[in-house]
Amino acid sequence: MEQAVFFDTLRESLWIAVRLSAPLLGVALAAGLVIGLFQALTSVQEATLTFVPKVALLIAVFWVSMSWMTTALVTFFTDRLVPLIIGG
């Protein structure tokens, strides 16, 4: 495998990883910000108050975006990695 093909495939795989993790990280950031603001305003410092809603939101977002993530990964593998494995 040529060096340019290797680095291009690596760059594309890292970009896929960023695109797939962005919705989950964005929701976790927004939920943490909202819950932290709520805790600061009400002086309620409960550990489960931050954990349970964040996990529930992450599960919901993952469930909604699961088909898009699977499609993106399958497309990447069939268009990019399978031809390299076969030798094309």
Image: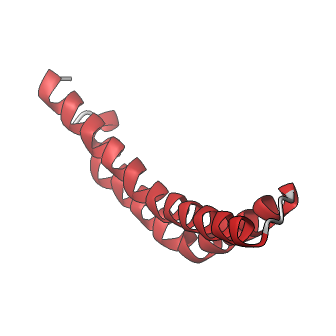
Instruction: Using residue 1 as the reference point, say whether residue 29 is left or right of it.
Output: right
Quarter of the image containing the C terminus? top left
Instruction: Using residue 44 as the reference point, say whether residue 40 is left or right of it.
Output: left
Instruction: Using residue 47 as the reference point, say whether residue 22 is left or right of it.
Output: left
Q: Nearer the viewer, residue 32 or 43?
A: 43
**Residue 73: % across, % down:** 43, 56
Q: Nearer the viewer, residue 40 or 86?
A: 40
Q: Quadrant of residue 49?
A: bottom right
Residue lying furthest bottom: 64
Quarter of the image containing the N terminus? top left
The colour scheme applied to this rendered structure is secondary structure
Q: Is residue 68 above or below residue 73?
A: below
Q: Nearer the viewer, residue 81 or 54?
A: 54
Q: Nearer the viewer, residue 49 or 1?
A: 49
Q: Look at 64% across and 68% down and name the residue there.
A: 37
Q: Is residue 85 above or below residue 69?
A: above
Q: Is residue 88 above or below residue 29?
A: above
Q: Look at 58% across and 64% down and name the residue there.
A: 33
**Residue 84: % across, % down:** 28, 36
**Residue 75: % across, % down:** 36, 60
Q: How many discs mark residues in the rendered view?
A: 0
